[in-house]
């Protein structure tokens, strides 16, 4: 009797990042004292292994400021009307559900970022290319 061995190659399961980078993130409100009057010209989102990211580009070299917090209702500027924002279990990215513009008033722009739950986040600013723009970056943990 002849027995033939067959080699079967099985791919390893995908590696899930440890997400240690998100371990110190919190859910409380954060803000900065500086608020730029330069124009906000681009908002974009991206997915990373441990978090979803929303980037706000401000056109100009002045330090960009921010105020980020969880709220139950987002209102439009300057009218104050409620703005529906998808959240909860809407299918999509791991954390991010929607980014909606709520308006500008007296040099401040308001955006609503819908997420699947109240998740830890971080927020920071950074200079863009040749300091021609500033960015406000919001990362939401998965």
Image: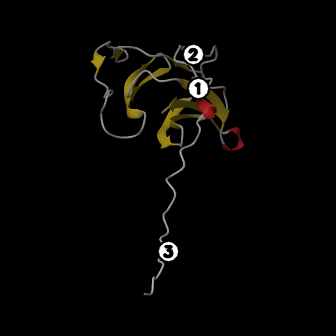
- Left/right placement of residue 98 relative to residue 6 reads left
**From mark 3 to mark 2, how far is it between C-alphas?**
56 Å
**Which residue lies at the image location 48% right of the left edge and 33% below the top edge?**
142
**From mark 2 to mark 1, how far is it between C-alphas?**
8 Å
**Which residue lies at the image location 50% right of the left edge and 52% below the top edge?**
14
Label 3's element? loop
Q: Nearer the viewer, residue 85 or 23?
A: 23
Label 2's element? strand
Label 1's element? strand
Residue 105 sits in which quadrant?
A: top left
Residue 98, can we see it? yes
**Which residue lies at the image location 37% right of the left edge and 17% below the top edge?**
77
Q: Where does residue 127 sit, x and y in percent of width and height?
A: 68, 35
Q: Residues within 10 Å of mark 1 (few under 14, many from 20)?
A: some
**From mark 3 to mark 1, how far is it between C-alphas?**
50 Å
Q: Earlier in the sequence, mark 2 or mark 1?
A: 2
Residue annotated with mark 2: 30
Q: Nearer the viewer, residue 41 or 127?
A: 127
Q: Which mark is residue 7?
A: 3
Residues at badges 3 and 1 in contact (C-beta under 8 Å)? no
Residues at badges 2 and 1 in contact (C-beta under 8 Å)? yes
Q: Earlier in the sequence, mark 3 or mark 2?
A: 3
- Left/right placement of residue 48 relative to residue 76 reads right
Q: Where does residue 62 sit, x and y in percent of width and height?
A: 66, 27
Q: Which mark is residue 123?
A: 1
Q: Earlier in the sequence, mark 3 or mark 1?
A: 3
């Amino acid at each position: 009797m002849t027995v033939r061995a067959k080699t079967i190659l099985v791919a390893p399961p995908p590696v899930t990042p440890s997400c240690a980078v998100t371990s110190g993130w919190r859910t409380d409100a954060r803000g900065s004292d500086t608020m730029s009057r330069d124009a906000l010209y681009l908002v974009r989102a991206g997915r990373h292994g441990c978090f979803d990211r929303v980037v706000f580009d401000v056109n100009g070299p002045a330090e960009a400021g921010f105020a980020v917090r969880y709220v139950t209702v987002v209102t439009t500027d300057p009218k104050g009307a409620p703005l529906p924002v998808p959240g909860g279990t809407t299918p999509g990215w791991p954390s991010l559900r929607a980014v909606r513009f709520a308006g500008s008033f007296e040099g401040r722009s308001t955006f609503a970022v819908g997420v699947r739950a109240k998740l830890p986040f971080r927020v920071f600013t950074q200079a863009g290319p040749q300091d021609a723009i500033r960015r406000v970056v919001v990362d939401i943990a998965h």
